[in-house]
Image: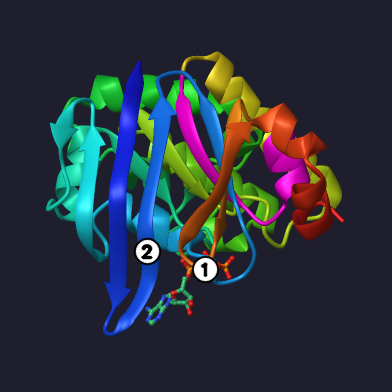
Amino acid sequence: MSLLQLRQVHAYYGRIEALKGVSLTVNEGEIVSLIGSNGAGKSTTLKAICGQVKIQGSVIFGGKDISAQPPHRTALEGIAHVPEGRRIFPRLTVKENLEMGAFSVKDKKKVKERTERAFSYFPRLKERYHQPGGTMSGGEQQMLAIARALMMQPKILLLDEPSMGLAPILVDQIFDIIQELNRGGMTILLVEQNAYQALQIAHRGYVIQTGDILMEDEARSLLANDQVKEAYLA
Ligand SMILES: Nc1ncnc2c1ncn2[C@@H]1O[C@H](COP(=O)(O)OP(=O)(O)OP(=O)(O)O)[C@@H](O)[C@H]1O
């Protein structure tokens, strides 16, 4: 069943048309990877979904048109966005960062349960519970950014370049965790420049180029596609 649908979405930064009619679907339980080169419109697609840019066209989530909704509303609908550059609160501890992720949840017991659940995916964060986020390694900060997004118990995770700037061993760990989250039932839309690994863990994928969807297919077909290999997997 389709959880998220973009229908002919156009997005603008002033006069720049960053998305030129993007249509894509994410079904419940899937990992869908959106790949493309620098400036292709990957981050803008995620921003369009969560209401951070002005759009034309429609975004349908769980059967409801959420096109005109601002970010705090789309978050409440169940859309969690982990932006590029892992914007955690650097001076707050891991614990406080996680609590901020669940700011609208008043029941402390629930917050604690969710924290424990996040730690089951990210045991490293448990060891760093009282450490300020900004003093942790890049990989740990990425883990914290994802864990914080999980605190709202979203229906979908939008991940923007989670592997960016990480050492290969940490990239592998992050991709493993993304897969594990998906096995636990989380639906994921993954934006990545690391096209090879992103397609390896995805069910389906889309290729975006200068604001247009160029291709869509099963991830394994995209991995085997000569055009994709030449442009994105070389
Ligand atoms: N705030 C902004 N103001 C003006 N133009 C912008 C802004 N943000 C993005 N753009 C432009 O919109 C287009 C798409 O950018 P976007 O960040 O979505 O690409 P991307 O595929 O995520 O690239 P990258 O991998 O480099 O992050 C680019 O041409 C970019 O220069």
> Which quadrant would residue 112 be assigned to in this image?
top left
| Image coords of residue 145 (percent x, y) | 49, 48
For the C terminus, the quadrant is bottom right
The outermost residue toward the bottom is 15
**Residue 206 shows up from this direction:** no
| Image coords of residue 120 (percent x, y) | 57, 21
Instruction: Pick whichever, 94 or 206, lies toward us.
Output: 206
Asked if residue 169 lies left or right of residue 53, the reply is right
Asked if residue 202 lies left or right of residue 63, the reply is right
Q: Are marks 2 and 1 in contact (CB under 8 Å)?
A: yes
Asked if residue 133 lies left or right of residue 164, the reply is left
Residue to which mark 2 is pinned: 20
> What is the spatial separation of the Cα atoms under label 2 and label 1, in whole angstroms?
8 Å
What amino acid does circle 2 point to?
A: Lys
Residue 196 part of the magenta segment: yes
Residue to which mark 1 is pinned: 210
Whichever of callouts 2 and 1 sits on the residue coming sooner in the sequence is 2
What amino acid does circle 1 point to?
A: Thr
Magenta residues span 186-200
Element marked by disc 2: strand
> Measuring 40% from the left and 19% from the top, which residue is drawn there?
28
